Image: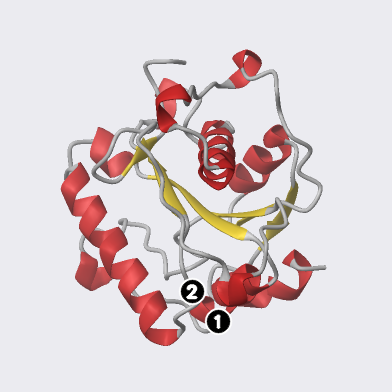
Amino acid sequence: MLEHLPCRDRVPIDAPLELEPLPGLVPWSGSIAYLDRDGVLNRGSPKYINSPSELVLLPNAAEAVAKARRSGMRVAVVTNQSPIGRGLWGVENLAAIHDRLRTLLLQTDEDAVLDIILHSPYLPHQNAWARKPNPGMLEAARQLLQYAESGLDWSNFNIRFGKNWTERPIETGSVMVGDRESDLIAGEAHGVRSVMCPAEEGISAVIDDILD
């Protein structure tokens, strides 16, 4: 498990995370919207999203992300990215794609901030804890966001996974949103409600269910 950790763009998984205030300085409710990427925020492709220019937002995705954050939720993107493990392209290309994603969201709605993006570069046959349907990315996102909110010294941060993570918070208000069964299984394994969205509509089709 430890050799198959979730990844962040350009920094180690346990690097300090600085969070932007929620809109209107509303307090964090403790809930997280865990979002798959392709088919939730942007149009997916059977041949992957291979460059920033290929990334196209789904209708009203930015407005939905902003609505979640205005309700007091933090937003974490958790995305499987096996093209890295397949050697099709590297981590900097993925970071550039995510830069483009953030830019497009904020151009539409200034409150459509992605608090953290995590990815899994591993191949399906590796059964990495960090690859959905396993819950490793969700576990990492929760711990990183919660620690960032705490204001504690990052030198004491120690991320844990699976059975090694014993001090798990109750995530009654959190939700995993995805367009595939593997997303829903990951949410259930993490102990949160899971919501399936249609890939051609994405998060905007289920935002009211998320905030129910």
Three-letter code, disc 1: Glu
Q: Position of residue 81 (x, y in %)?
A: 35, 44
Q: Position of residue 26 (x, y in %)?
A: 66, 69
Residue 128 visible to an observer of this rendering: no
28 left or right of 134? right
Q: How many numbered marks have been drawn onto this rendered protein structure?
A: 2
Towards the viewer: 132 or 78:
78
User: Which numbered marker is on residue 80?
Assistant: none
Position of the C terminus, as image quadrant, is bottom right
Q: Residue at x 27, y 69 (%)?
A: 100
Q: SS of the residue at dot 1?
A: helix
Residue 164 visible to an observer of this rendering: yes
Three-letter code, disc 2: Ala
Q: Which circle's residue, 2 or 1, is located before the other in the chain? A: 1
Q: How many C-alpha atoms fall within 10 Å of the one at disc 2: few (<14), some, or many (≥20)?
A: many
Say whether marks 2 and 1 touch (CB < 8 Å).
Answer: yes
Q: How many C-alpha atoms fall within 10 Å of the one at disc 1: few (<14), some, or many (≥20)?
A: many
Q: Residue at x 41, y 76 (%)?
A: 105
Q: Up-down: is 94 above or below 134?
A: below
Q: Up-down: is 24 above or below 160?
A: below
Q: Up-down: is 13 above or below 37?
A: above
Q: Position of residue 101 (x, y in %)?
A: 34, 68
Per the image, the residue denoted by label 2 is 112
Per the image, the residue denoted by label 1 is 63
Q: Position of residue 191 (x, y in %)?
A: 75, 37
